[in-house]
Image: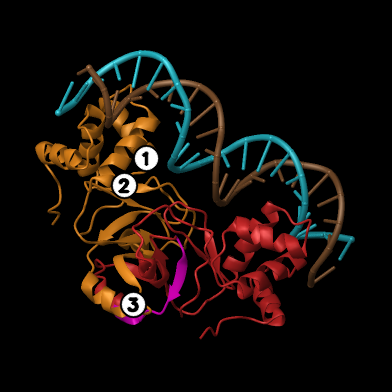
Chain colours: A red, B orange, C cyan, D brown
DNA sequence: GTGAATGCAAAACCTTTGCAACTGG
DNA sequence: CCAGTTGCAAAGGTTTTGCATTCAC
């Protein structure tokens, strides 16, 4: 169950709180991320946004994503050195990355317990814990295929 | 205490096991990573390797790093979309990234307990758990400075 | 009205690739 | 000997930047 999705008005307010304006481009990008739970890359966001706003540019997509990340409406997920992915689920969760098909899944994780496992040296102050799990997703496991080229075009279904 | 550092002979053997040759470049890169516990980037490895091998090229550095990663002598650490960093500590550990100075520290972490916290959906098989902790390191905390531009030139001391 | 955001193009950044020459086992 | 490795240069994918124009507040 995802609780963190905001209405247009809430989105506008959250942008304003951080000094950002609500523009058509930002609204389209945010709505698109709310509706597509498959963690698209900036380029995928660009392609989808262009359906609603044919004139939108890549630079604007990056600008919108940056604004939405900064004001806390979405989060950026970086795995390896592949293109960043974006996620409108702000509930606490971690990510499962399928080494077979490359899909990304949201996974529930009791973060308090994770926190307690890390033995920080004296004086260190943690602000954020990010857990990434790698493995084989149910679909790929069922297909019993050996590991092969990633198929990043396949979208991962959310699991939270 | 780091147990995973290999002698030259062990390194050669581990490379051979995966079908790689032991070359002067690979030996220099591996030794350099063993001696510098600050998680250098490929470019930093290049600059340091050039002191021993003035003719070494960036492409070769990447090739060496790839071979060393593949045969299990070093690991690659990717944070955000900054340049990959490399680490000769193969003991089980996670990473602490200082949001103030950008340094990377090895941190001991009881991974079995972390594993138990993630609630994988049925059919999902996990092979690897990667925990990244972000926060303020002891040095930056002591300086009591507000968060500012990262200073990636400052090397992080190992903490394991 | 005014500062912020957009769109375009060019550049930056990190990494990979193609290929001829060289070399380790 | 010969597949694997090196070094060079060029290209690749992702993201950022500069700047004139447009727009949100």
- The answer to whether one can see residue B134 in this image is yes
In the figure, is residue A81 to the left or right of A121?
A: right
Up the image or down, B16 lies above or below B50; here it is below
In the figure, is residue A61 to the left or right of A149?
A: right
Q: Chain of mark 2?
A: B
Residue visible at 33% across and 58% down in the picture: A146
Between marks 2 and 3, how big is the CA–CA gap?
27 Å
Between marks 2 and 1, how big is the CA–CA gap?
8 Å
Residue B42 x %, y %: 37, 40
Q: Residues within 10 Å of mark 2 (few under 14, many from 20)?
A: many
Q: Which circle marks residue A91 in the picture?
A: none
Tell me where residue B49 sits by quadrant. Answer: top left
Up the image or down, B52 lies above or below B16; here it is above
Q: Chain of mark 1?
A: B
Q: Which residue is mark 1?
A: B42
Residue B4 x %, y %: 15, 51
Q: Which residues are magenta?
A: A102-113
**Pointer 2 and pointer 1: residues touching (CB < 8 Å)?**
yes
Q: Which residue is mark 2?
A: B86
Up the image or down, A81 lies above or below A23; here it is above
Q: Residues within 10 Å of mark 3 (few under 14, many from 20)?
A: many
């Amino acid at each position: 169950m995802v609780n963190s999705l905001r209405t247009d008005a809430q989105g506008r307010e959250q942008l304003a709180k951080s000094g950002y304006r609500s523009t058509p481009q930002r609204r389209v990008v945010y709505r698109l991320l709310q509706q597509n739970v498959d963690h698209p890359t900036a380029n995928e966001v660009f392609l989808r946004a262009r359906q609603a706003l044919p004139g939108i540019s890549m630079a604007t997509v990056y600008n919108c994503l940056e604004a939405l990340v900064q004001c806390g409406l979405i989060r950026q997920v970086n795995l390896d050195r592949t293109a960043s992915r974006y996620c409108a689920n702000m509930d606490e969760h971690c990510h499962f990355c399928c080494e077979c098909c490359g899909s990304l899944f949201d996974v529930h994780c009791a973060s308090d317990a994770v926190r307690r496992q890390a033995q920080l040296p004296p004086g260190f102050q943690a602000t954020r814990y990010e857990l990434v799990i790698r493995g084989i997703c149910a679909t790929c496991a069922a297909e019993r295929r050996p590991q092969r080229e990633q198929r990043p075009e396949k979208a991962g279904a959310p699991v939270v």
